[in-house]
Image (spheres, rainbow, N blue to C red):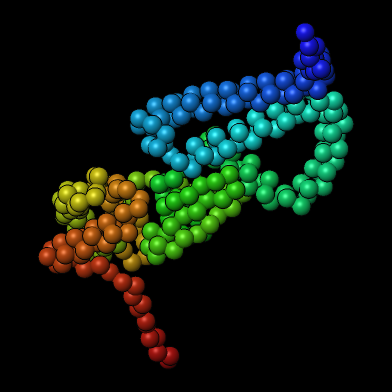
Amino acid sequence: MYKLAFDFSDIFNSDMFWRIFKSSMVLLGAFIIWEVFKNVYTKTAAKREKVDNLEGVTGSFTSAVLGGAKIVLVIFSLLIILELNGINVTSLITGLGIAGAIAGLALQDFIKDTIMGLRIISDNFYRVGDVVKYNGVEGIVIEFSLRSTRIRSIDTHDELTISNRNIDQITKRSHLYDLDIPLSYDEDFKRINKIFEEMSHEIARIDGVESCEYKGTQFFTESAVKYRLRIFCMPERRPELHRASIRLIQDRLDRENIRIPYNQLDIHNISGS
């Protein structure tokens, strides 16, 4: 009988084996947690968006949430593995905290962008496909990340990248759009009300317009009375539908022989004695 020169029991009794085994279990547990979280989040997001799978969920928000969760899981798993392998994690975190404070000063804009990106997600402020307004530019959100938002201008199709820390300057546009038409004080307002009521039904029939309401007299200005029409439509189609509505109004006012007033200046010549 030959005696084995290598005893496998030595492996199982070694500290290195158990450290490797425990580290592997941590990685396996992290992988299982990740898969469970990803599947649960995907199903929840798909149900909220009323689609069947991940492809139907708003991609950028899904990527941001899953990416953030993955980073947190990797960091926690790494810290546990380091602790299992005899590294003092507390001292390491303390050292990293000092270095992090220094790095934070240099990366404060990056941190602000990331925090505001998480806030945009949690508050569901806007998402890909929504129309927002920034510095006078109305555009469709075409891409979102934790750091920035990219929009495409409705008017010019120019693309603009906005840092998420500027969220307080971003306005989400609604389907509501008010159109104020100035008319002369000389016009019979009862007749005007009837005409605008009819025009609101005509505008509502324009392809792309969801509905149109005549709201009545809105302002009394120096040279005109302003009457308001309220139009509901997709924000990204607002420029073209605005032009279509204006053409319809202009044509109807011309047929009714109603003129849009312009500013006039009366000059009085007072001759001296």
Quarter of image, res 258: bottom left
**Which is more toward the observer, 7 or 82?**
7
x 25%, y 67%: residue: 260
Question: Which quarter of the rendering shows the N terminus?
Answer: top right
- In the figure, 114 relative to 134: above or below? above
Determine which quarter of the picture holds residue 51. top left
Question: In the drawing, does residue 221 fall left or right of residue 40?
Answer: left
Quarter of the rendering containing residue 58: top left
Left or right of 232 on screen, residue 143: right
Left or right: where 96 falls relative to 148: right
- Residue 34 percent coordinates (x, y): 57, 27
| Residue farthest toward the front in the current orientation of the protein | 1
The residue closer to the viewer here, 22 or 15, is 15
How far across and down, in percent of the image, does residue 100 sit? 79, 42
Give the quadrant of the C terminus. Answer: bottom left
**77 and 213: which one is in front?**
77
Whether residue 170 is visible to the viewer of this picture, yes or no, is: no
Q: x%, y% of residue 170?
A: 52, 50
- Farthest-out residue, bottom: 273
Question: Residue at point 43% right, 90% down?
Answer: 272
